[in-house]
Every structure is written in C-alpha cells, then in structure tokens.
Image: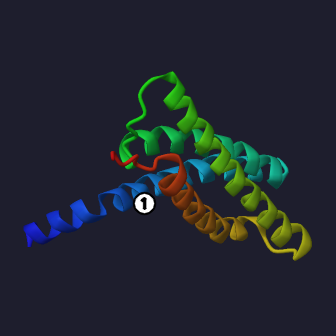
C-alpha cells in the first residue's frame, strides 16, 4: 500500500502541491476579501486588494514548492515574475469581470459568487503557470 501511495505522490506531486498551495492562496484571498467586504469596502476594491495579496503569496509558493523553478539570476527570476504577474492579471480580469457580471448585472450575492469564480480562476492560473511561466526547458 505504501508503495502505491509513494508512486501516486511521485506521479502527481506537482498537482498535489498546487492544490495545497491553491487552497492556501484561496484562504489568503478570502481572509483579505471577506473582512474588507463586511467592513463596507466596495466588493470590487476588496476583491482587488485580496487579489494582490493572493498573487504575492502564490508566486512565492509556486516558484519554490510547486513548480520548483530553476530560474537563476535576476533576469531569469524577473522573467518568471513578470510572466506570473501577467498571467495573474489575465485571471484577475476574468475574476473582476465575472464578479461584476454576476453581482451588478444579474444581482447575485457577492459572497456566494466569489466561490465558483475563484475555482475557475485557480484552474486558469494552473494552466498559465504550468504551460507558460514555470515550464521546464528541455535540453537538446
């Protein structure tokens, strides 16, 4: 049984850690968003502040523990950070757009809509990080 678990862990290690840190990133996002929201901060402002906190946390954890970036030197690290922020800006725009659509246009409760919108954002972020930001360069 232990061998099977070890084999599964090795095979899905990256996904496992992405899920762990994805949950923690979501927790950071929610721990910033909900108090601001309940204090009366406009939901889009609260969402933007929560997004910044979550992106910072996610970059640090994804770089080190999820995708184990091999980038060395300031130029390579800045490239990764720039692509990471660009990808998160894209998903942040999706996040803000969907929140505005469902809350302002449709009239749904922001505290409920925040959850499924965040799930979609997590999926987008994984794809961008895996395929663009932290992709492994194969040696020829």
Q: Nearer the viewer, residue 110 or 77?
A: 77
Q: Which residue lies furthest to the right in this view?
A: 105
Above or below, 73 relative to 31: above
Q: Which residue is drawn at 90% across and 67% down?
A: 104
Residue 130 x/y as whole percent:
48, 55
Residue 103 x/y as whole percent:
84, 68
Q: Which residue lies furthest to the top in this view?
A: 74
Residue 40 in sight: no
Q: Which residue is drawn at 15% across and 63% down?
A: 6
State left or right for residue 33 relative to residue 138: right
Residue 133 x/y as whole percent:
53, 47
Residue 3 in sight: yes
Q: Residue furthest front?
A: 140
Q: Residue at x 62, y 62 (%)?
A: 121
- Residue 97, image quadrant: bottom right
State left or right for residue 26 relative to residue 35: left
Pointer 1 local density, CA inside 10 Å: few below 14, some 14–19, many at least 20: some
Give the quarter of the figure containing the N terminus: bottom left
Q: Mark 1 falls on what kind of element?
A: helix
Q: Nearer the viewer, residue 102 or 90?
A: 90
Above or below, 59 relative to 15: above
Residue 98 x/y as whole percent:
78, 67
- Residue 99, image quadrant: bottom right
Judging by the rendered image, the residue that carries numbered circle 1 is 19
- Residue 9, image quadrant: bottom left
Question: What's the coloring here?
Answer: rainbow
Above or below, 59 relative to 113: above
State left or right for residue 82 relative to residue 107: left
Q: Which residue is drawn at 52% across and 50% down?
A: 25
């Amino acid at each position: 049984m232990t061998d099977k678990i070890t084999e599964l862990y090795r095979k899905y290690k990256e996904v496992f850690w992405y899920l762990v840190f994805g949950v923690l990133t979501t927790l950071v996002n929610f721990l910033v968003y909900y108090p601001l929201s309940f204090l009366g901060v406009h939901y889009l402002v609260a969402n933007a502040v929560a997004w910044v906190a979550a992106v910072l946390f996610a970059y640090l954890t994804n770089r080190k523990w999820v995708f184990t970036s091999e980038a060395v030197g300031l130029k390579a690290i800045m490239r990764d950070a720039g692509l990471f922020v660009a990808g998160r800006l894209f998903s942040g725009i999706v996040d803000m757009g969907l929140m505005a659509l469902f809350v302002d246009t449709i009239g749904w409760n922001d505290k409920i809509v925040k959850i499924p919108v965040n799930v979609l954002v997590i999926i987008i972020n994984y794809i961008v990080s895996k395929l663009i930001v932290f992709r492994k360069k194969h040696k020829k």
